[in-house]
Amino acid sequence: MIETGLLLAIIGAALAVILAGIGSAVSVGRVGQAASGVVTEDPDKFGSTLILQALPGTQGIYGLLTGFLILQRTGLIGGNAAALTIQQGWAMFAAAMPIAIGGLVSAIVQGKTCISGVHLVAKRPEEAGKAIIFAVMVETYAVLALLMSILMLFGIQV
């Protein structure tokens, strides 16, 4: 039977992956739908719209990275699972929350910004760089959430 502390850490890792992944999947899909319409009219705009579609996918990667770090810190990757106390388990769970929640929300908001960027590229393709910069500004907060999760994880004594 899995100890409570370890179970809490596993749930935190799962939520980091699942929530950030949901945000990314929803947004990449929505931006792709908008980009498909633009590329149907002008195939030369594929490159610019593809970059905008890819941007909200990074949060899912950040969530996956956090999940891997939790599994590594707990010994689940490598075969020697640590006997975590409940306090350590809750700490691991809490460390996963910045990227789980921050990744979910920032991916959705970034997706909306990218859709607007796709519309900008449709009308003024020479402004693609500006559309990408608008979307990258949202990325800053996903990176901050990832950084906080990592700093919290490595502050936990296991």
Image (tube, rainbow, N blue to C red):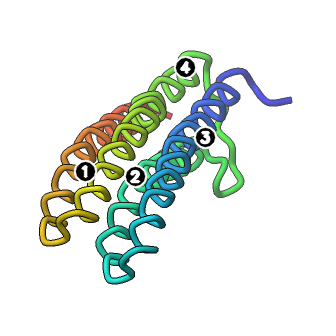
Alpha-carbon distance for marks 1 and 2? 8 Å
Q: Quadrant of the N terminus?
A: top right
Nearer-N-terminus badge (4/2): 2
Nearer-N-terminus badge (1/3): 3
Q: Is residue 105 above or below residue 115?
A: above
Q: Amino acid at mark 1?
A: Ala
What SS does tag 4 mark? helix
Q: Is residue 155 visible?
A: yes
Instruction: Please provide percent x and percent y for residue 23.
Output: 50, 41
Q: Amino acid at mark 4?
A: Trp
Crowding at dot 4, Cα within 10 Å, few <14 / some 14-19 / many 20+, comes out as many
The residue indicated by pointer 2 is: 56
Q: Residue lying furthest bottom in this view?
A: 44
The one of 24 and 83 positioned closer to us in this rendering = 24
Q: Residue at x 53, y 54 (%)?
A: 29
Q: Is residue 69 visible?
A: no
The residue indicated by pointer 3 is: 18
Nearer-N-terminus badge (2/3): 3
Q: Is residue 11 above or below residue 52?
A: above
Q: Amino acid at mark 2?
A: Pro
Crowding at dot 3, Cα within 10 Å, few <14 / some 14-19 / many 20+, comes out as some
The residue indicated by pointer 1 is: 135
Instruction: Please provide percent x and percent y for residue 122.
Output: 28, 64
Q: For this view, does 25 lie left or right of residue 101?
A: right
The residue indicated by pointer 4 is: 90
Q: For this view, does 33 lie left or right of residue 58?
A: right
Q: Are marks 1 and 2 in contact (CB under 8 Å)?
A: yes
The one of 62 and 6 positioned closer to us in this rendering = 62
Q: Residue at x 48, y 55 (%)?
A: 28
What SS does tag 1 mark? helix
Select label 1 or label 3 by which is in front.
1
Nearer-N-terminus badge (3/4): 3
